[in-house]
Amino acid sequence: MSLLITGIGELVTNDPGVGEGPLGLLRDAALVLDGDRVAWAGPAAAAPACDESHDVAGRAVLPGFVDSHAHLVFAGDRSAEFAARMRGEPYAAGGIRSTVAATRAAGDEELRARLHRLVDEMARQGTTTVECKSGYGLTVADEARSVRIAAEVADEVTFLGAHVVAPEYAHDPAAYVKLVGTAMLAACAPYARWIDVFCERGAFDADQAREVLAAGAAAGLVPRVHANQLGPGPGVRLAVELGAASADHCTYLDDGDVAALAGSSTVATLLPGVEFSTHRPYPDARRLLDAGVTVALASDCNPGSCYTSSMPFCVALAVREMGMTPGEAVWAATAGGARALRRTDVGRLSPGARADVQVLDAPSHLYLAYRPGVPLTAAVWRAGRRR
Ligand code: NIG
Ligand code: FE
């Protein structure tokens, strides 16, 4: 079944071979979906005939957002922690343990229901590709259950047993690191493509992170790293050294970190919802872009540091607070996320891509930053199916 989307005022293809500039922009355009794929993108006047058609009346059409960093398998509530933070309490990695206790106590059905609710919430805001991490179980059985449930709905699953040291191992972190890299990894690897570590003071140091990521790589998982979120540290260099797909947060960087990222294929994934929700300075996206680093934007949706699932909100923050142009921010939230997940089939709307389409109730992508907080998602297709 083919579908012609017509009346597109502005089409963001993210394919410079199809349209103008890095966003591959076309005006007065049409798009053809065939089954779960994009079959054609071009000027409306040249559109082929299709089985069905859908007129978007001059609205903007973009690739669905690729949210490359989220923690969605959890139970519990940390709204009081947020309120305390807004009164001046600092954010600390230790808060993760309260979600661990609630997650361990929850049944599979509760975790599944919460996950589905969040993925639906994301889809309603234009997100069509979701990465989901474990990291609130921290036992072999609870981490395995987290990645198994995540794999039921997420496009990409990441094993994050090294989120913090499990409370039972508080007096023997080395034994916990060993557990993560052996029995826990063995139980989780069948459900995951990626392995992640929270490399930060209060979580894991560079040697511990290296041990976990090397074990993951030996099991066929590809590294990504929570790096330089709460202060300067070794995370970004480690990510580059290990050829990680992405270094995430990148809030506190020195010139050496920026140079290392610029000379690598590691994407800098910026998560401005975290800085919004933890009262911290925003990462300097302009500095990274000017150095030639590939930048992605993601939500980091999680119950502690950032409980937003909204990619439009992240785009607006990136433009207002991080020196990105609206075009750079939209690219980072779509094509950038795809790069961070090493996917070539999402984050673009040109022939062969998965048919992941969002229609904005607006004439151009600029409105995502120009109208912050306004629900602009008019329609979404994921793999050719209307949501
Ligand atoms: O990406 N930094 C580590 N993990 C999450 C926060 C998790 C939590 O506070 O529950 C993050 O910010
Ligand atoms: Fe995170």
Image (cartoon, grey):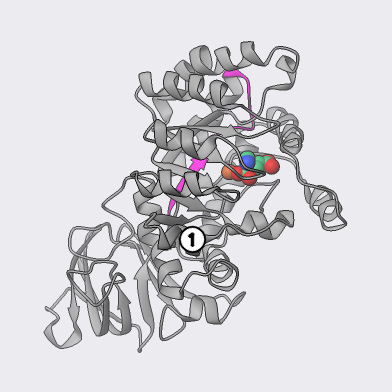
Against 372, is 113 above or below? above
Residue 215 placement: quadrant: top left
Q: Quadrant of the N terminus?
A: bottom left
Q: In this view of the protein, can residue 219 be seen by the observer?
A: no
Q: Quadrant of the C terminus?
A: bottom left
Residue 173 is covered by the magenta coloring: no
Q: Is residue 132 left or right of residue 282?
A: left
Q: Residue at x 63, y 13 (%)?
A: 174
Q: Which quadrant of the figure shows ligand 1?
A: top right
Query: What percent of the width, then of the height, locates residue 144?
Result: 53, 24
Report the amino acid beneath label 1: Arg
Q: In this view of the protein, can residue 84 be seen by the observer?
A: yes
Could you say whether the residue bearing mark 1 is in a helix, strand or loop? helix
Q: Residue at x 56, y 48 (%)?
A: 253
Residue 139 is covered by the magenta coloring: yes
Q: Residue at x 50, y 61 (%)?
A: 285
Query: What percent of the width, then of the height, locates residue 121?
Result: 56, 59
Q: Which residues are magenta?
A: 129-140
Residue at the spot of label 1? 287
Mark 1: few, some, or many residues within 10 Å (few <14, many ≥20)? some
Q: Residue furthest front?
A: 255
Against 123, is 108 above or below? above
